[in-house]
Image (cartoon, rainbow, N blue to C red):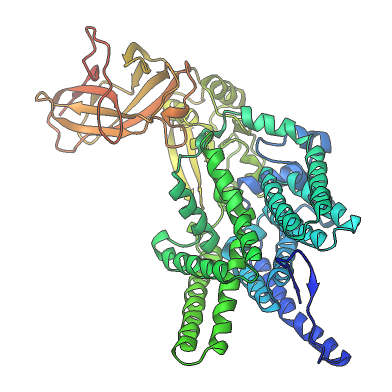
Amino acid sequence: MLYFCSDGNVMQRVQSIRLRGARVASSDHSSLMAPCLIAAVAFALRLHRLDGQSLWFDEGFAIHLATQRLPQMIEQNPVGWLPLHSVALSLWLRVVGDSPFAARFFSVVFGVLLVALLYSLARTLASSRTGAMASLVGALSPFLVYYSQEARTYALWLFLSLLSAYLLLRALGHPERIRGWIAYTGVTSLALYTHYFSIFLLPWGAAALLYTAVRSRRWKTLLSGVAGQLVVLVASVPLVAFARSSILDRYGFWRSPLSAFQVVLDLWYHFTTGGNLPFDRALPVMGTFAVVGILGLVLFRPHWNGALMALYLLIPSLGMLALSSWRELYVARYLAIAAPAAYLLVAQGLDRLWAATTAYRGLLGKSALAAVLCSTGVVGYSWCQALQNYYYNPDYARDDFRSAARFIEAGEGEQDVIVMSGGGIFTALLPYYEGRMPWIDMPSFGEWLDEDQAVQGLNALLGGRSGGRVWLVLSGNQITDPQNLIVAHLWTYGYVVEAKNFPGRIGVRVLVFTPRHDADTFSFAPFKYEHLRANFDDKVELLGFEIDGSRFAPGDDIHLALQWQARTQLEQDYHAFAHLLNDRNVVVAGHDKLPLNDYFRPTVWPVGEPLRDEYVLSLPQDLSPGAYGLEVGLYSYPDLRRLPVARDSSLDRDRVLLSPIIVDE
C-alpha cells in the first residue's frame, strides 16, 4: 500500500511479511476487482443515453472548432477558451467520425480515466479502501457524469489536473528520477493549455514542494520542483495572447455578482448534485457531504495528506473569489478542478466511520454504523433522483436544438428564412437541421448586437424576398442581444403566427413571423425615438422614447421603449419604472425592472452608448376611458430612492413625464 508520509519519505511500500508470494499475488488480483468494477459502473453511467440529449451551444461550438484547420481553430477560438481540447478533439473526430455521439465519447473516455485516477491518488494518500470509496463517489457523482457526457473541455481538464497532482506526489517520492519531473512538467503544461484555472495547480504544487523540503531537508527536491514549475510557466507563454484577449474583452458582463457565501454555497450545490435537484431538496445531501468531508479532513492520517486535499479544494475557490473582486468570473464548472478533492475527503470520512464500526464495540460502534448507513442513504437517494432528472427530465436537460430543428423542417416554406439570435447557436442547430432555408446568426460569437448590425443583417437576408416567413430561433439572446433588437424589429414590421418553446437549462424558443397585412415583404430601418434628454443625477441620460401608439382600449398592452445612456461608469444597479397614472396620480398600470436585463445590468453599461430598453404596461380590463399620464424614472434598490432629474418644462423632480395615453371605450 502506498501513502504520502509526513516524515519526508514520500512513497513507502507497506507489506506484511507473513504473506507468502502466492497469497500476495492473489491479494493483488482481488484488490483490482473493486476498482475495475467501479470503472465499469462509471463507464455504464457515462455511456447511458449519451446521445439522448441535444447538443447545446458550447458543445456545438466545440465541435465546430474541432472541424476547422489549425489556423482557423486558433483564430476563431472564443474568449475564455484554450486550444488543447479543440486540437485533441479534432484528431479524435478524424478517426471516429464527427457525430455528436463520437464527440461526447471523447469526454466519456477521460471521465472514466478520471475515476480510475481517483482510486490511485486516494490509495496513495490513504488506503485501498479509501481509494475504492473515492472512485465510487466519483463514478456516481452527477456532477462528473454531466461533464463526462459533454463535448467540452472539462473531462479532459479534470483528468489532466488530477494527473498533474498525482505525478507531483510520485516525483516527490523519487526526486532523483528525472523522468518523474518531466512527466509532471509535461502534464501540468497540457492542463494549462486546456483551461486557464489550471494555474491554481502551481501554488498547490508549491505548497507540497515546500512542505516536503522542510520536513525532509531535501532542498534539491525543492529546486527540482521549482525548476519544473518554471518550465511550465515558460511553456505557457503563448497563452499570454489568449489571456490578454480575455482580460480586455467587455463581453464578460453577463454574470450576476455573487457574494463569497453565495459562491461557496452554489459551488457545493453543484459538486453534490450536478445542479440536477431543486435547491431545497439538495440541502440534505449538501449537509451530509459537508459533515462527512470535514470528518475525513480531521481524521486523515497522516494529517498532511488531508491538508493537501484541503488545499486542492481551497486554493482554486479562494483564487476565484479573489479574481471575482476584480471582475465577475464565477461559474461552477470553472472550479470543477476542485471536485475530486472534495470527493476524496468524503471518501476518507466514510472510511474512518466504517473503520470505527469494527474498532469500537457498544454504543460508539453502533453510532458509527448508523452514521455510515445514514450518510450513504441520503447521498444514494439524492443522487438517484439527480441522475434520473439529468437523464429523463427535460427541465434539467441541455437545450433542445434537435427538436427545434425538426420543428422548423416540418413547417418551412419555399421563401422562408431562419434568423438565429444567440451569437453562434448555428453550431448547435445546424448539425440537426436538414432543410434548405437561408440563415443568419447574429451577432458573432463573443460580441453583443448593436442596431446597425441588426438592421443590416436582417435586410441582407430578407431583401427582395416576397411572401416568406422568418423563423426566429432564440437561445441565450439576453446575453448577445440585451436590447432585444432582433425581436423588436421583427415585431415592428411583422407579427407572430406561431411560437414554440423547447426546454433546457437555458431553453430554445422558435417564433415564426410573417409581414404585416399592408406589406408582403420585410424592410428594416433604425428605430426613431421622440427626442428627450433627461439627466438623472449626472449618472444616466434618457435620450428618447418610443410608444407603439397613442390610443388604446382596456385590456391592451402598451409597448414602450426607452433609450438610456450612461454618462459615467455606474457603481450600482439602478432599477427603472414606467407607470401609467390616472387624474388622481394613482398608478393603474406599471412595469418596474432592472433596465435591459439581468445579464446587462447598469453597472456594466458602456459609457456614452445609447441602449434600448423595453417595457410592457398591461391595461386593466375595467379601465375607464380618458387621458392617462405616463411617468418613467430610475431608483436605487432596495432603498427605493428615486434619482433626481434636471428640471425643465417637461420634467419633474424625480420622474420624466412622457406623452399622455388615451384610453377609448
Q: Residue furthest top?
A: 649
Q: Is residue 102 visible?
A: no
User: In the rendered view, would you say 47 is above or below 648?
Assistant: below
Residue at image position (56%, 70%) is: 296
Vertical arrangement, residue 642 with respect to residue 162, above or below: above
Q: Position of residue 587 (x, y in %)?
A: 17, 31
The answer to whether residue 545 is left or right of residue 60 is: left
The residue drawn where x is 56% and y is 39% is 323
Quadrant assignment for the N terminus:
bottom right
Q: Nearer the viewer, residue 78 or 642?
A: 642
Nearer-the-camera pick, 545 or 158: 158
Residue 73 in sight from this viewpoint: yes
Q: Is residue 601 above or below residue 390?
A: above
On screen, 178 above or below 45? above
Report whether 605 appears left or right of 320: left
Residue sitting nearer the eye, 214 or 317: 214
Identity of the residue furthest to the front in this view: 217
Where, quadrant-wise, is the C terminus in this rendering?
top left
Q: Left of 80 or right of it: where is 92?
A: right
